[in-house]
């Protein structure tokens, strides 16, 4: 069977406010998981699915994203859509209408979530169902992701409502609630309905589509899915995606990282160009590129940010540790010397 023509948009423009100050210098789509940028994992899934070209919208630190990926990803051409002001998940489509409408199906993926995206299954369901849009829903998601109501799904697997509002006449007892996974497929004809200016794709397109009698199909995946909106979520994603059994136990140590003799790692990920000095214990933690953990330190449930130098003998638990930068630290952060300590669960 001939593959359909696919084009994609990876949403990569967000500011990453809840991950500050980590995202003051590195945009969320470039945060590493298992040694690769989050957005690189997404682009790889799109390329494997046969996507002929992909676009990324840019705003916060957009030049860094463009510099990281250049003009193509593994031979898949890339386009960039800079936004001087954030346009949201619907508004991002308007400048890319001509680029996207050349495809038989348009794939949209959040650039700051991590999953082994089942792109082929999503597209297959979309084309076979004849739906105007098809959403990826996830089973394995934190309970608080449903606080806003999630996506209501009927027995046939069609969306029947969003964010607590369901179609009239549909009994609640016949519906299931699922978390939207941030990946969806659109019929190119829907691009004609996208207005110019900022907008949200749920309220600005999908809710109206349902109200008019349109069909939105769904695919539910049991694969691990991580929204990287908060430091705790990012740590969970990095540990889930990066841990492997090796000489130091269930850990991941990048080839360019240094772990000195006598240092101990337990369920830890150490990214490239980081160094763990002798006598340190790093447990359930992520050490990002360029960071140094001084001798005899103790880290637990912690992210150590890019280039952060933790003094010898430091004890840290449930914190995001970053170098002090030019931007004011978050209100709940503590500044000690040249480091900023932010609550991981704050």
Image: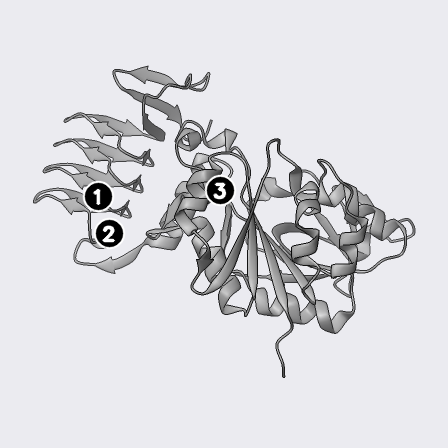
Q: Which mark is residue 162?
A: none
Mark 3 crowdedness (10 Å alpha carbons): few <14, some 14-19, many ≥20: many
- Taking the spot 23% from the left edge, 27% from the top edge, the residue there is 315
Residue 221 picture location, percent across and down: 59, 62
Q: Secondary structure at mark 1?
A: loop
Residue 34 picture location, percent across and down: 34, 53
Mark 1 crowdedness (10 Å alpha carbons): few <14, some 14-19, many ≥20: some
Image check: 327 left or right of 296? right
Cβ atoms at labels 2 and 1 below 8 Å apart: yes
Q: Which residue is mark 3?
A: 228
Q: Which residue is mark 1?
A: 273
Image check: 278 left or right of 9? left
Q: CA distance from mark 2 to mark 1?
A: 8 Å
Q: Which residue is mark 2?
A: 254
Residue 174 lies in what quarter of the image?
bottom right
- Taking the spot 79% from the left edge, 59% from the top edge, the residue there is 189
Residue 164 appearing in the image = no
Quarter of the figure with the N terminus: bottom right
Image check: 309 left or right of 81? left
Task: Point out the residue furthest to the bottom here.
Answer: 1
Mark 2 crowdedness (10 Å alpha carbons): few <14, some 14-19, many ≥20: some
Q: Point out the frontmost of discs 2 and 1.
A: 1
Query: What sort of colour scheme is used for the picture?
Result: one colour
Q: Of 162 and 317, which appears nearest the observer? A: 162
Residue 123 picture location, percent across and down: 65, 67
Q: Of 5 and 128, which appears nearest the observer? A: 5
- Taking the spot 63% from the left edge, 81% from the top edge, the residue there is 2
Image check: 263 left or right of 185? left
39 lies above or below 51: above
């Amino acid at each position: 069977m001939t593959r359909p023509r696919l084009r994609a948009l990876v949403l990569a423009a967000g500011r990453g406010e809840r991950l500050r100050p980590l995202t003051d210098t590195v945009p969320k789509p470039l945060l590493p998981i298992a040694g690769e940028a989050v957005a690189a994992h997404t682009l790889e899934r799109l390329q494997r699915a046969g996507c002929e070209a992909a676009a990324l919208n840019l705003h916060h630190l957009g030049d860094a994203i463009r510099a990281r990926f250049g003009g193509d990803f593994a031979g898949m051409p890339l386009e960039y859509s800079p936004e001087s002001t954030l346009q949201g998940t619907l508004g991002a489509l308007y400048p890319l209408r001509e680029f996207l409408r050349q495809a038989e199906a348009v794939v949209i993926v959040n650039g700051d979530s991590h999953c082994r995206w089942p792109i082929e299954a999503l597209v297959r369901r979309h084309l076979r169902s004849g739906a105007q849009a098809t959403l990826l829903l996830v089973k394995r998601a934190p309970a608080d992701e449903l606080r806003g109501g999630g996506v209501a799904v009927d027995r046939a697997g069609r969306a029947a409502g969003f964010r607590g509002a369901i179609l009239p006449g549909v009994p609640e007892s016949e519906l299931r609630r699922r978390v939207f996974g941030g990946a969806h497929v659109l019929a190119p004809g829907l691009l004609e309905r996208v207005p110019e200016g900022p907008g949200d794709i749920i309220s600005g397109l999908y809710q109206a589509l349902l109200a008019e009698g349109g069909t939105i199909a769904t695919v539910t995946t049991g694969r691990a899915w991580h929204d990287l909106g908060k430091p705790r979520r990012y740590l969970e994603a990095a540990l889930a995606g990066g841990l492997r059994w090796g000489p130091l136990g269930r850990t991941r140590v990048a080839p360019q990282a240094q772990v000195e003799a006598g240092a101990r790692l337990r369920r830890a990920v150490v990214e490239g160009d980081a160094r763990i000095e002798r006598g340190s214990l790093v447990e359930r933690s992520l050490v990002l590129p360029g960071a140094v953990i001084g001798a005899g330190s103790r880290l637990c449930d912690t992210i150590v940010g890019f280039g952060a130098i933790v003094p010898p003998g430091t004890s840290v638990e449930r914190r995001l540790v970053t170098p002090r930068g030019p931007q004011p630290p978050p209100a709940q952060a503590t500044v000690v010397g040249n480091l900023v300590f932010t609550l991981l669960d704050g």
